[in-house]
Image: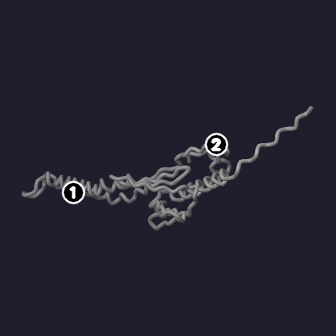
Amino acid sequence: MTQPISYGGRPMTPVPGAPTPELRVARFRGHARRLTWSALVLIAVAGAVGFFYGNLPAPLENWMLLAGAAAIILLLVVLPFLSWWAHVYTITTRRVLERSGVFGARRRELDHVRGYAIQVRRGLLQRMWGAGTLTLTNGVDAPLRLVNVPSVELVHEALVDQVEVNQILAHRDAQPPLPPPPPPPVRR
């Protein structure tokens, strides 16, 4: 976490009236296990090109083999990797952001101060890898799904902490300021 931690492990709240800068708590991508098939395809294509290069039948040439291998690698390895790399989740002290898109960026955000329900769903493979899917719903906007989050329990705890701190700050800042104390009596 990027915030100072108080006794008990909860983030400290700033002094009333002090500006609260937006700090990044976590930035992560979905679990990389979805790239397993891409890695296997890359290994298989490299092995096939190494085996068949120079051993092709008469009508086929080596450049055809290389062009086919390049097309397969582009479609089944590079594009899935770019898709995974371009989908980023960011948790700050004020909001949760989801940014995705290889060629055109799409961005969604959900503020902590409004509060939201957090649902954790973990399948069998996700449990084996320590991952899970978080669904954040605030009742107004469409649910924000954080899919295949690595270390899902840690991310869940960070989200709960941020919602708690932001709601405490919003409640405290909504209270009217205390009147100044009366001046001390004048002695003669």
The one of 46 and 132 positioned closer to us in this rendering: 132
Q: Secondary structure at mark 1?
A: helix
The residue indicated by pointer 1 is: 48
Q: Position of residue 123 (x, y in %)?
A: 46, 67
Mark 2 lies on a secondary structure that is loop
As drawn, 181 above or below 128: above
Label 1 with label 2: CB-CB less than 8 Å: no
* Vertical comparison of 7 with 116: above or below: above
* Furthest residue in direction left, as rendered: 58
Label at residue 18: 2
Instruction: State whether residue 132 appears in this view.
Output: no
Q: Toward which corner of the image does residue 41 lie, by quadrant?
A: bottom left
Q: Residues within 10 Å of mark 2 (few under 14, many from 20)?
A: few
Quarter the C terminus occupies: top right
Residue at the image position 60 percent from the left and 53 percent from the top:
166
Which mark sits nearer the N-terminus, 1 or 2?
A: 2
Distance Cα–Cα, label 1 vs label 2: 63 Å
- The kind of residue tagged 2 is Ala
Q: Position of residue 42 (x, y in %)?
A: 28, 55
Residue 25 vs residue 18: left or right?
A: left
Mark 1 neighbour class, 10 Å CA radius: few under 14, some 14 to 19, many 20 or more: few
Question: Vertical placement of 18 versus 106: above or below?
Answer: above
Q: In the orientation shown, which residue stands out farthest toward the top?
A: 188
Residue drawn at point x = 48 percent, y = 50 percent: 27
Q: Nearer the viewer, mark 1 or mark 2?
A: 2
Q: Coloring scheme of the render? A: one colour
Q: Nearer the viewer, residue 181 or 119?
A: 181
The residue at 65%/44% (across/down) is 17
Residue 186 seen: yes
Q: Outermost residue toward the right?
A: 188
* Viewer-nearest residue: 60 or 117: 117
Amino acid type, residue under disc 1 in the picture: Ala
